[in-house]
Image: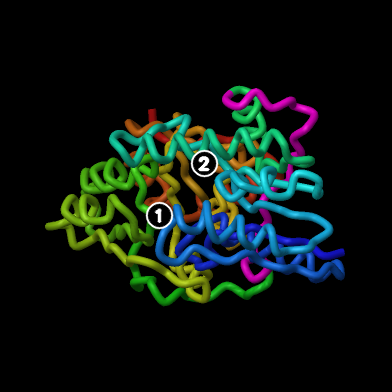
Amino acid sequence: MRVCLIVRRLSTKAGGIAVYTRNLIRTLEREGHEVELSSGERFSYLLWQFFKVPLWLVRSRCDAYHAVGVIESITLPLFKPKAEKRVTIHDLIPLKHPRKGLKGLFERFFIRLGLLSARKCDVIYAVSHLTKVDLVRFAGIPEDKITVIHQPIDERFLIEPPRAGKFREPGKFMVGYISRMDYHKRHAPLVELFKQWDNPNARLLLAGTGEEFERVKKLAEGDERIKLLGFIPDEELVDFYDSLDVYVHASKYEGWGLPIVEALARGKPVIVFDDAEIPKEVKELCLRVSSLRFMEALEVLYLNRKTLRKLLARKSRGGDDEIPVRE
């Protein structure tokens, strides 16, 4: 079977969709399918969306077409009305947590276009039950048309032996967060909370780039415990997680939460905030705290390293314990 994938970007910097796409390509090829990729975006999104993709669709001859994201599907039904069409939808962040200004309007417009096109696809994949609920609520897509398939992680996170980690500082308590620095990821509030923790042996590693980078960098100035690592390539991700004692995912909303699953696979306790919208199947594996008790939770884990191992053991058995903070 020949499968055509509509792919905007494959670079690691494109985030979770790029990781999903690379895993999808490997899976399809392992199953014996022939995979063809659309032209990627290089200079202009509008040029790619309304010229390069339609031209490729007209010329292509495949048994099935799969848009790897909601905006990738915009022109698919128009130019391949009779072909088998599939789309994967990861999240509806621009609709649930809209960005202000012209950029926000632009994002919402194209997400809406993508959702209209998705309704005309034969199969809609959602990466979590939370995304499925959002698709029913925001797009009116029939529930029975949506199939939930969780986003997998690369097998190296499971099979590579534990290592010291190149980012680790000996004798320090390492806390880390990796994510694109977008408005809903809450890097700035995390920095402000961490600065209130008066522990000279603690370190906060922030990996990623994005529109909030300069703001976060300015907030971190004057506190040498906070390290901004910038973009970390794929081949260094295991090193990043293995450098940590605790992984913190401060995001307000996730369609799935790939870094959380990767950190758990590396045997790290993961802290999320209890007000975060994160799929239940991921969030229930994490340690949930309010922002008011975040520092206290870190202090308990810092003072009793055995607590980390106990919490991990309980979570791996499906327990639902909260962090044992002092009353």
Q: Is residue 25 above or below residue 212?
A: below
Give the mark nearest the N terminus, 2 or 1.
1
What is the tally of numbered marks visible in this picture? 2
Q: Which amino acid does label 1 sit on?
A: Arg
- Specify the color scheme: rainbow
Q: Is residue 122 left or right of residue 76?
A: right
Of the pair 162 and 208, the residue shown nearer to us:
208
Q: State the residue at coordinates (66%, 48%).
A: 76
Question: Which residue position is annotated with label 1?
Answer: 180
Horizontal side of 152 relative to 223 (left or right) equals right
Local secondary structure at mark 1: loop
Residue 208, by quadrant, is bottom left
Q: Where is residue 125 in the image (x, y as percent from the top left)?
A: 71, 43
Image location of residue 219, percent across then percent down: 18, 50
Q: Can residue 267 be seen in this view?
A: no
Of 286 and 198, nearer the camera is 286
Residue stretch rendered in magenta on the structure: 138-158
When asked about the image quadrant of residue 223, the answer is bottom left
Residue 272, label in figure: none
Q: In which quarter of the image is residue 62?
A: bottom right
Residue that mark 2 sits on: 254
Q: In which quarter of the image is the C terminus?
A: top left
Give the SS element for disc 2. Answer: loop
Residue at 32% of width from left, 31% of height from top?
A: 292
- Label 2 to label 1, Cα distance in Å? 12 Å
